Image: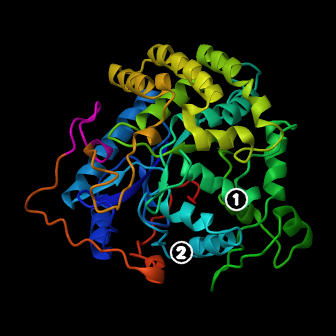
């Protein structure tokens, strides 16, 4: 799985973290002996990408241990990883200065401001699951592909956790999902229906525009309207090679991305010490337990009528999920079946009592009441530090898996906090974080 986190001051999360302070905290985190790969997103969001695991509990245990170490390290600097789908306070400030992100910003700017907001202020929980088996049935790759694109809307609604942007309520439970829908449409859409999964994905890859053409020296070229298929046919500005195709795949951001496995990209980052655990456990149970997979497929199949012919995330089903969450009766009914199926499936899969209790608590608090985490967040107010995160459980608190997070030590200064500039200066880039190369086999992040 991949966990993205916003990094905020524990006492004044509404103010940006200073450059030197963040750089120092980043270096301390990088020194940790983590099992997961550690990278950073363009706006300085921290990302942990777990190693492939043989079971749900193996993934849970290693990820929980890594996250506990990261929380403790950041806590020593008076910082915390915050699980919200979109930063509720800050405008986009790109901190990473790499050719990839220079090109991405230029390309996405053509469609409007959503690209910068996605790059620099969003965070998610990405669950990675087996693509499936060759034979048909609940564990076959064809069924799992179809299930992912219908269940994905239910996951958007159930875990929506980003109702604010730059101090204002946006009208969406998942502003993050709305940002993705507003980006370059070809790059973020699911492949068209009507074809087998492999054929659909191959056509989608070839017919999506090239985000950038890499150069050894100088800025990368950012062509406009050049699909990969056309690049192959024309060979201009230079003939593409296999490495160009591999890189092109890392610039496609559909809600379900096939990469030898299925990468579920539609879930907002979750608040609290164990919030990330629920989407991981629920998605794994609903895809990997045959009984649960069959039950859930029957429950979500009727959603195809609401989705219509448009591709996710721009169809009516996904739009409603992002705006209404589980307040929508159809999505609430589907989620009720899904979470009810997940709990016994987790027991059959050998999930621990702590995992099952965490999922059950989420189900009782949200799904059973037609609510989502976004409904728990208070109004941002004037963002003086007495607004969104006065509930400390959104930042820290005891974990069912690893116990309480240690507070910042009294001998460790929390450091200065940068007050936001006014006017155009608010968009000036913040600290520059040196890049960390991704581990082999991991696609570069958005």
Q: Main secondary structure of the magenta part?
A: loop
* Residue where numbered disc 2 is placed: 98
Q: Residue at x 27, y 35 (%)?
A: 399
Q: Residue at x 87, y 73 (%)?
A: 235
Q: Secondary structure at mark 1?
A: helix
Mark 2 crowd level (few <14, some 14–19, many ≥20, 10 Å Cα): some
Q: Secondary structure at mark 2?
A: loop
The relative height of residue 422 versus residue 442 in the rendered view (above or below) is below
The relative height of residue 112 versus residue 409 in the rendered view (above or below) is below
Task: Give the mark, 2 or 1, whose residue is nearer the N terminus.
Answer: 2
How many numbered marks, from 0 up?
2
* Between marks 2 and 1 in the image, the one whose residue lies nearer the viewer: 2
Magenta stretch in the rendered image: 393-405
Q: Quadrant of residue 212?
A: bottom right
Q: Residue at x 78, y 54 (%)?
A: 205
Residue 405 on image: x %, y %: 22, 44
Mark 1 crowd level (few <14, some 14–19, many ≥20, 10 Å Cα): few
Tell me the distance, in whole angstroms, between the alpha carbons under discs 2 and 1: 18 Å
Residue 259 on image: x %, y %: 66, 46
* Residue where numbered disc 1 is placed: 246
């Amino acid at each position: 799985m991949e966990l993205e986190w916003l990094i905020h001051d524990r006492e004044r999360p509404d103010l940006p973290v200073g450059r030197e302070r963040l750089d120092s905290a980043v270096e301390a985190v990088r020194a940790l002996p983590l099992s997961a790969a550690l990278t950073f997103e363009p706006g300085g969001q921290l990302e942990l990408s777990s190693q492939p695991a043989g079971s749900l509990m193996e993934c849970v245990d290693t990820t929980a241990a890594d996250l506990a170490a990261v929380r403790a390290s950041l806590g020593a600097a008076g910082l915390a990883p915050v699980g919200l789908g979109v930063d509720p306070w800050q405008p986009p400030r790109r901190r990473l200065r790499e050719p990839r992100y220079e090109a991405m910003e230029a390309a996405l700017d053509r469609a409007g401001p959503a690209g910068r907001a996605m790059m620099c202020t969003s965070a998610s929980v990405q669950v990675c699951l087996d693509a499936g088996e060759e034979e048909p049935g609940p564990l076959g790759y064809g069924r799992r592909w179809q299930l992912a694109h219908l269940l994905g809307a239910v996951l958007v609604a159930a875990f929506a956790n980003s109702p604010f942007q730059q101090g204002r309520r946006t009208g969406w439970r998942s502003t993050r999902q709305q940002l993705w829908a507003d980006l370059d449409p070809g790059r973020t859409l699911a492949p068209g229906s009507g074809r087998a999964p492999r054929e659909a994905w191959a056509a989608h890859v070839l017919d999506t525009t090239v985000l950038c053409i890499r150069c050894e020296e100088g800025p990368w070229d950012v062509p406009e309207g050049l699909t990969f298929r056309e690049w192959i046919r024309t060979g201009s500005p230079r003939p593409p090679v296999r490495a160009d195709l591999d890189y092109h795949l890392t610039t496609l951001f559909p809600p379900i991305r096939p990469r030898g496995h299925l990468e579920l990209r539609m879930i907002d980052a979750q608040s609290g010490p164990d919030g990330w655990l629920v989407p991981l456990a629920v998605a794994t149970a609903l895809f990997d337990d045959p009984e649960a997979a069959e039950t859930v497929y029957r429950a979500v199949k009727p959603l195809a009528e609401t989705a219509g012919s448009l591709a996710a995330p721009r169809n009516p089903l996904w739009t409603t999920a992002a705006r209404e969450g589980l307040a929508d009766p159809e999505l609430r009914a589907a989620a009720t079946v899904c979470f009810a199926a997940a709990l016994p499936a987790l027991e059959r899969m050998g999930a621990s009592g702590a995992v099952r209790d965490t999922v059950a608590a989420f189900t009782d608090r949200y799904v059973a009441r037609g609510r989502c985490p976004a409904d728990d967040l208070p109004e941002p107010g004037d963002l003086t530090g007495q607004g969104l995160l006065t509930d400390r459980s959104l930042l820290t608190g005891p974990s069912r898996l690893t116990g309480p997070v240690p507070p910042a030590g009294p001998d460790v200064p929390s450091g200065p906090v940068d007050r936001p500039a006014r006017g155009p200066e608010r968009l000036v880039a913040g600290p520059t974080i040196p890049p960390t190369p991704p581990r082999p086999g991991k696609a570069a992040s958005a």
